[in-house]
Amino acid sequence: MAASLGAIHAATAAKATTELRSNEDKSRILNAHHETRSLIIAANLEPPVASHVMTGPATRIAVLISGEGSNLQALIDAAQAERLGADIVAVVSNRSAARGLERARAAGIAALHLAAVRGQERSEYDAALAALLAPLDPQLLVLAGFMRILGPRFIKQFAGRMLNIHPSLLPKYPGLDTHRRVLEAQDEWHGATVHFVTEELDAGPAILQYRLRVRPGDTPESLARRVHVGEHIILPHAASWFAAGRLRLVEGSVMLDGRALLAPVSIDEEGDST
C-alpha cells in the first residue's frame, strides 16, 4: 500500500509498506541530508481503538544531550523549517563543553548545564534535573545522546513523555559500542531506533527504526556515519508525531494515530528492502 508518511494511519491491520513519494517529503530529506534517499516504511498496526484517540498536541520540547549534538541539530533544523510542530524550549547538558550547547545558543534556545557533583547519588542529580526542567514545563523530553542513566523516579515523573535515540536495531545491542558489536556478530542489518524511555535501559517500546545493510569492508566508523544519517531522519519524525498528538504510549503499547504498533515503523536506507 503506497502513501505519504503522513498517511500511515491508513495502513490496515496487516503489514503495510509505504513509500515516501510526495515531493514535499523528498525535498525534506534532500534539504536535511544533501542527498536523495529512497525510503521505505513498513508498519504493523492493530485496528483503531476508540478509547485511545490521540490527545492534544505537545508544543514544548526539552532536549537532553552530553556531546556533539548532531541529533539536536536535526531537531533544530526541523523546528526552524516548521516541520517539528513544537518549540525547543531548552537544551540541557551534563557536560559544560558539549558542542550541543553551542548549537542551542546559536539557535536562540536556552542552553543549560547541570553538572554532577562528585559523590552525588543518581537520585540527587535526577531531582536537580527535574527541578531545572519544572519551570520550563516541557511536554516532551528528547534524549539525544544524553550519556547518563536516569533513575526510576525521574522516569516515572515523565512516563510516556520521553523519547530516546539509540544506535542499534533494538532490542539488539542495548548499551554502548553497538557498531563494533554488530560487526563482531556478522549481522546483515544495523541501524537506529527511536523508543519511549522506560526504567530498563534501552528497552522501552520502539517507535521508529532506520535500517541499513552492513557492507563488506564496513568499520565501526563507517557504520557510525551511516547510522547518523538515519538518526537525523527518524528522531525529528518521531518527535513531530508526538508533538502533533499522533503518538502516545498507552499501557505499554505504542499508539500511532489511535492504532497500536505491533512492530516499529521502519525506514530503510536507499537500495535496501524489508
Image (cartoon, grey):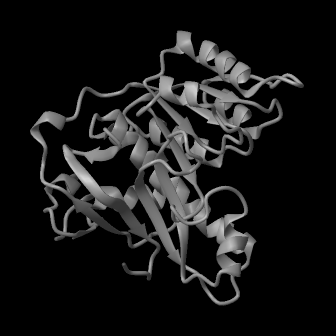
Q: How many circles with numbers are drawn on the protein?
A: 0
Q: Measured from the top left, where is residue 245 in percent x and y? A: 28, 34
Quadrant into which the N terminus falls: bottom left
Residue drawn at (35%, 43%) of the image: 252
Residue 175 drawn above or below residue 52: below
* Residue 112 visible in the snapshot: no
In the image as oriented, which residue stretches furthest toward the right? Answer: 118
* Residue 243 visible in the snapshot: yes
Relative horizontal placement of residue 151, taking residue 58 as reference (left or right): right
Relative horizontal placement of residue 189, taking residue 55 as reference (left or right): right
Relative horizontal placement of residue 217, taking residue 246 as reference (left or right): right
Residue drawn at (40%, 49%) of the image: 237
Q: Measured from the top left, where is residue 17 in percent x and y? A: 24, 71
Residue 131 drawn above or below residue 123: above
Relative horizontal placement of residue 36, taking residue 105 as reference (left or right): left
Quadrant into which the C terminus falls: bottom left
Q: Measured from the top left, where is residue 138 in percent x and y? A: 48, 21
Frontmost residue, 182 versus 269: 182
Q: Using the rendered view, name the quadrant where residue 82 is placed.
A: top left
In the image as oriented, which residue stretches furthest toward the left? Answer: 50
Frontmost residue, 172 versus 23: 172
Residue drawn at (58%, 81%) of the image: 187
In the image as oriented, which residue stretches furthest toward the bottom? Answer: 216
Residue drawn at (51%, 62%) of the image: 171
Q: Measured from the top left, where is residue 69 in percent x and y? A: 67, 43
